Image (cartoon, helix red, strand yellow):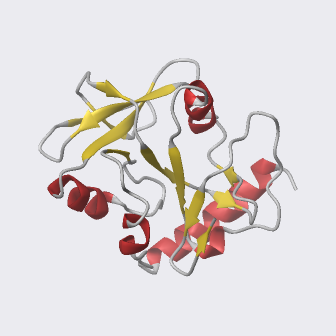
Amino acid sequence: MLKSKIRKKILKIRKKKNNQNLKLSFSKISKYIKKKIVGGYFPVNSEIDTLDFLKKLEQNGKQICLPVVKNNNKMDFYLWSFKDLLKLNKFGIPEPETNKKVIPDVVLVPLVAFDGKLYRIGYGGGYYDRYFSKFKSKKKILKIGIAHSSQKVSKVPINKFDKKMDVIITEKYILK
């Protein structure tokens, strides 16, 4: 099945599941957060809300950063605190106003779909794949996919640009 068809099908399922207020146990994620700088995301389109978890991390001394979308389907991460303002980007997603670019140690990645081999489908822009490629030889970034178990598909069609997650965490299980 094409990524676009999988994306359309799973987004409908995710929206329905998110309306049921399924909760992830963020203690599952905490054990993977040993480093200081954590890249998160601002939830949109029925993505799993990780903001409370990010707030706890910040209260426990971790630095939080969020992605900022650039031209040519690129993005970078910028430091952000819950005390800081956010601005809407061209997709209507809140981004930090700060100019303190950082390379996170860990990135929480919102997933549209995933498979048992830890491949993911996002929205199709390739932002995360490009970002992780940029730092592949410079820094090992732990990639943690965040999804509902209902977003799992039998096989994600992949190409040479697709990057595997290191871990995928759902409300029911953890894939490694």
Residue drawn at the location 18% of the way across and 58% of the way down: 60
On the rendered image, what quadrant is the N terminus found in? bottom right
Relative image position of residue 44 (x, y in whole percent): 43, 52
Residue drawn at the location 55% of the way across and 31% of the way down: 131
Relative image position of residue 45 (x, y in whole percent): 48, 55
Q: Nearer the viewer, residue 32 or 119?
A: 32
Q: Judge from the rendering whether residue 25 lies leftward or rightward of residue 146; answer left or right.
A: left
- Tell me, yes or no, if residue 38 can be seen here: yes
Q: Nearer the viewer, residue 119 or 137?
A: 137
Seen as rendered, the residue at the extreme left is 83
Q: Is residue 65 above or below residue 53?
A: above
Relative image position of residue 99 (x, y in whole percent): 26, 21
Q: Judge from the rendering whether residue 164 lies leftward or rightward of residue 127; answer left or right.
A: right
Residue drawn at the location 74% of the way across and 63% of the way down: 115
Q: Judge from the rendering whether residue 1 lies leftward or rightward of residue 98; answer left or right.
A: right
Q: Is residue 127 above or below residue 62?
A: above
Q: Nearer the viewer, residue 140 or 28?
A: 140
Determine the image quadrant of residue 54: bottom left
- Tell me, yes or no, if residue 87 can be seen here: no
Relative image position of residue 78 (x, y in whole percent): 32, 31
Residue drawn at the location 25% of the way across and 57% of the way down: 57
Determine the image quadrant of residue 50: bottom left
Q: Nearer the viewer, residue 1 or 164?
A: 164
Seen as rendered, the residue at the extreme top is 71
